[in-house]
Amino acid sequence: MKVSYQWLKEYLDIDVAPRDLAEKIARTSVDINDVYSLSDGLKKIVVGEVETCEPHPDSDHLHVCQVNVGEDEPIQIVCGAPNVAAGEKVIVALHGARIGDNVKIKRGKIRGVQSNGMLCALQELGFSDKIAPKDYDEGIYLLPDDAKPGDSVFPYLGMDDTIIDTDVTPNRGDMLSIYGNVNDIAAFYGLKPHFKELAIKKEGDEKTADLVKTTVNDEKISPTYKLRIIKGVKIADSPLWMQIKLWNSGIRPVNNVVDVTNYILLKYGQPLHSYDYDKLPGHQFGVRHANKDEKFTTLDGDEQTLIENDIVVTADDQPIALAGTMGGEGTAVADDTTTVALEAAIFDPIMVRKQARRLDLHSESSMRFERGINPATVETALNEAAELISELAGGEITQGIVTASEKPAQDKQITLSLSKVNHVLGTNLKMAEVTDIFKRLAFPATVSEDDQIVVTVPARRWDIFVAADLYEEIARIYGYDNLPATLPVMTRNHGGLTARQKFIRASRHDMEGMGLDQAISYSLTTVEKAKQFQIDPVDEPMKLDFPMSSDHVATRMSIISGLLIDVAYNVARNVNDVALYEEGRVFLPKGGERPEEQEHLAAAITGHLLANSWHLDDQPVDFFQVKGIVERYLHNLGIAGEIAYVADDQRPEMHPGRTADILIDGQLVGFVGQVHPTVAKDYKIPETYVFELNLEDLIAADKVANEYHPISKYPAITRDIALLVDKNVTNADVLAVIKKRGGAFLKNIHLFDVYSGLHLPKGKKSLAYTLTYQDVHNTLTEDQVNKAFDKVTNALVDDLGAEIR
Amino acid sequence: MGLRDKLTELREQGLEEIKNSKDLKKINEVRVKMLGKKGPITSVLRGMRDLSAEERPVVGQFANKVRDDLTEAIEARRTELEQAALNAELAAEKVDVTLPGTPVAQGQSHVIQQIIDQVVDLFVSMGYEVAVGDEVEQEVYNFEKLNLPKDHPARDMQDTFYVTPKVLMRTQTSPMQARMLEKHDFSQGPLKMISPGKVYRRDTDDATHSHQFNQIEGMVVGKHITMADLKGTLEVVAQSLFGDKLQVRLRPSYFPFTEPSVEADITCFNCMGKGCAICKHTGWIEVLGAGMVHPNVLKMSGVDPEEFGGFAFGLGPDRFAMLKYGVDDIRNFYQNDVRFLNQFDEKG
Ligand SMILES: [Zn+2]
């Protein structure tokens, strides 16, 4: 709410500078968006009196004016406004002035005639069209007759006021009024507010009840509903003091009736609505839910189609307003209005909120109804508005208020214990300090025996329900700055990461240690992408009920597709070496209410894993580099089971000849390989290698315990063997034979060459291994090794048809 | 010429030849020539038998000295020549030390991950446990049990991706408050937990909004937990993340699941409180929201609010990263441009 500092000062004797007050409000009550004056950044703008006004010799619309600006001689100003005339008091921007939008005014010639300044409209002083009065839409603003030439215009227009723009949390609806602000600020400073209410001085003889009837059948929609009638009003502008209060609060002045309702809205936080009595379809008022597809044209001229949850005010069952949100086009107070029906009500906050939200009609009124209304001031506000209208627009207030429903203004009693207050806040407050705080808040409080306080919370603080709410009142008025700062006392629990959390963190560090950058991609993606690259495919992903964008409609079932989007983003920006990994959730619907959330680890690599160097051969990433990362990672984990890489040509997104499933003791835990070129093309990425691992399986897998194995003191003996085998015999086949026939002393098998070049027979390839033999207890003899090696050689020939070279 | 004179001459001649030897081969030749069995010193010594018994020991001693001098000179010269040869070899091996080193593979953790790890480590050091929740949550835990009944206005502020009326993408990490309260065995001491994770809002992505971002939730509930403990804890967090010279300001705020509720601001680290564009000229930057756990939340999770109480807080690593590094577009965090990711290589 834009709170006027000057308005506050009418009711509070504060001697705190506006900025300091704003800081105090922020620390004690509600947040502050901004503190400003409408005159910020403006200078050399004064009151002028137009002495003469002659047509410009060279123009059909410009005038040449002699303007008294409080100096010995008048100054000459050329003005194009249609409403400029001799005798008017005007806003003059002098030579050297700075006006709105940081524009500088300089003297100069306009169509050959000297002009020493500019006569201004409010918009030219920075007023937005939302707050500048409509009367002056065409032309300059005219100041009141008593304005003194040469004076700064700011005090005349309230532009010297400071506006404290507060950001009110949903619970503090009371802070959306001057009344609420005055009460709260009085509490911070221990002041006694002298808030002034205006009572009705005189009512006419005619009874309001003879002019209108009202019933509210469903008091849930409108717990309080009241009407007054003012007859014989004359619509005109409201006085400047009221207009200033409105525009300083961000509301545009309209006329003396509408302005009064807005003024009361600001003062009490009570939205009012004024109807032109004679334009109503009937005089039996009511409030009800809208009918389905009922049509209603709002004040702004838009025809709204209503739904059954909407709420409307009716006259003879015809809608005349969207309750709490916006009035109707046909019944608004206009220049020809003579009888005003004035409504003060409370509408259901949720219904108003839903209606305003659905129709996107957020207004000063709806904002207040949504956050609640003080039931104690509905009638006060209605009476003051009626009185002000009759004072400003003439007319007679008819006798009595017509009431359809009335929510009683009930105070609440809450019992507190001083020890609990101190226990919760960590303070050491004394009873007198706490009771003083309630005194400042004007919450009557009585201390009973032991340490009990019974606090009476007035209806104007409808946000307070339970003791905890009062702890907050005590804490904020006492001051959060004064609260001690301690840490929770040491306790027996030691905290720390779980084994699972450590595992995940170690996995991330492993990936980074091997050159992969961590990515965090979106979990929501398209259905098609959600289904791609799954380790163990599930049919359909979980889909959102009402997505926001077609790119994010389903939860991912693998991480790779998101990483490929990241790769594409990089490649499109000429970043061609990309090595990313991501650790995060995938969501697999398995028939339950919610999908199974699995932690996965995936990577995508394109270009070079190592930056190009003068010192290294250019080696673009390939299957074996990526497999090496997986191998090293699984090695680091200390997986106890047997890890196997099994060729898989069935994964639709993967290269059929360059993809391996990763198995631990026969169980599928992930895959590694090259993205299928067709899929890569769809993603607009070059040759890219990926892997994805199910961390849940890896976390659950048995690990090798670290234990010490003595290093043999006896020498190791090696034998090299080169084999010529059929092309489709794999390394794994060879290793299996060697391991099976290797004997007890075979310690290690190392593949040192793979060759399938030109001078080999067609369909053959050569594999070369070094076999290392060692005994822990003895020196091996040549004979022992030769025997063991011969067994291997023979087995390779017999089982695999190998030719030993 | 006597033997002595002959020896003296041989010594002079030998030293001269040693000095003029330019390489190891030559010095070896000199050694064989001078000190060998057929060398002149040996033959001089052979002539000693012609000397008198008085002269013999004197000349013998002198001859030995000459031989020792020459041996020593040869060794010294040999060392000198070896050193020179080594130096020449090393000079030939010289490299341009200004050439760049061979690249080593090293990846980078994501800037948001760095902040999460920092916060998690800080709380773990204070004895908190880390509780990680599901990203697809039940509506009951995301809202109801946090004192956000249906039609609560705060639900409008968190536009939600629903899957079914009962299942949604969690909008906050706060559901872990309720889940941990239900799970914790209070006979074993207070609950101290921190819960980082991804959250989702039904938002259109732009520079300041992302439909996916991160939160870290923290909560301490026990018999003796106070609002002063909350204030102290928030000061530790803010100062350990942004620097201990910064002040912390608590302001009243509103969250349905805490009462009292506060927001914590720190002195703007850009202008140190003077006011600038980053802090919107207030001198303060909002960093987290917090409060004392609402009695309704405790009650709904089966914890007696008369006996137990505590605080909860939530902070946004994305926002922290934006503030700390001046990142002006939140989408940077999820596009994973390698040039962006690699800017945050300071560990910790
Ligand atoms: Zn700043």
Image (cartoon, coloured by chain):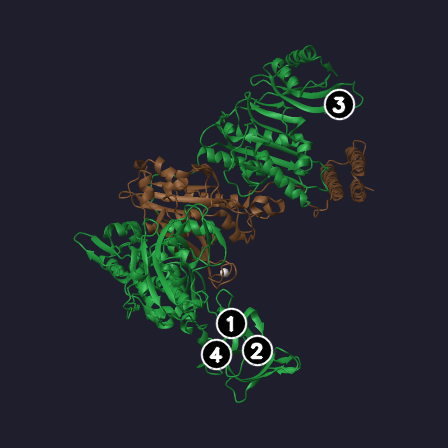
Chain colours: A green, B brown
Question: Disc 2: which chain?
Answer: A
Q: Nearer the viewer, mark 2 or mark 1?
A: 1
Tell which circle, 3 or 1, labels the residue nearer the N-terminal end.
1
**Mark 4 to mark 3 CA distance (whole Å):** 95 Å
| Labels 4 and 2 share a subunit | yes
Which residue is under mark 2? A118
Q: Looking at the picture, tell me which residue is in the foreground, A535 or A57.
A: A57
**Mark 1 to mark 4 CA distance (whole Å):** 20 Å
Asked whether residue A377 appears in the rendered view, the answer is no
Q: Nearer the viewer, mark 2 or mark 3?
A: 2
Q: Is mark 2 within 8 Å of ligand 1?
A: no
Q: Nearer the viewer, mark 3 or mark 1?
A: 1
Tell which circle, 2 or 1, labels the residue nearer the N-terminal end.
2
| Labels 4 and 3 share a subunit | yes
Rendered residue at 54%/46% (across/down): B111
Q: Residues within 10 Å of mark 3 (few under 14, many from 20)?
A: some
Which residue is under mark 3? A756
Label disc, if present, on residue A264 of the rendered structure = none
User: Where is residue A312 drawn, in percent x and y?
Assistant: 40, 52
Q: Looking at the picture, tell me which residue is in the foreground, B69 or A351.
A: A351
Q: Is mark 1 within 8 Å of ligand 1?
A: no
Tell which circle, 2 or 3, labels the residue nearer the N-terminal end.
2
Which residue is under mark 1? A136
Q: Is residue B44 above or below residue A203?
A: above
Q: Nearer the viewer, mark 4 or mark 2?
A: 2
Which residue is under mark 4? A152
Q: Residues within 10 Å of mark 4 (few under 14, many from 20)?
A: some
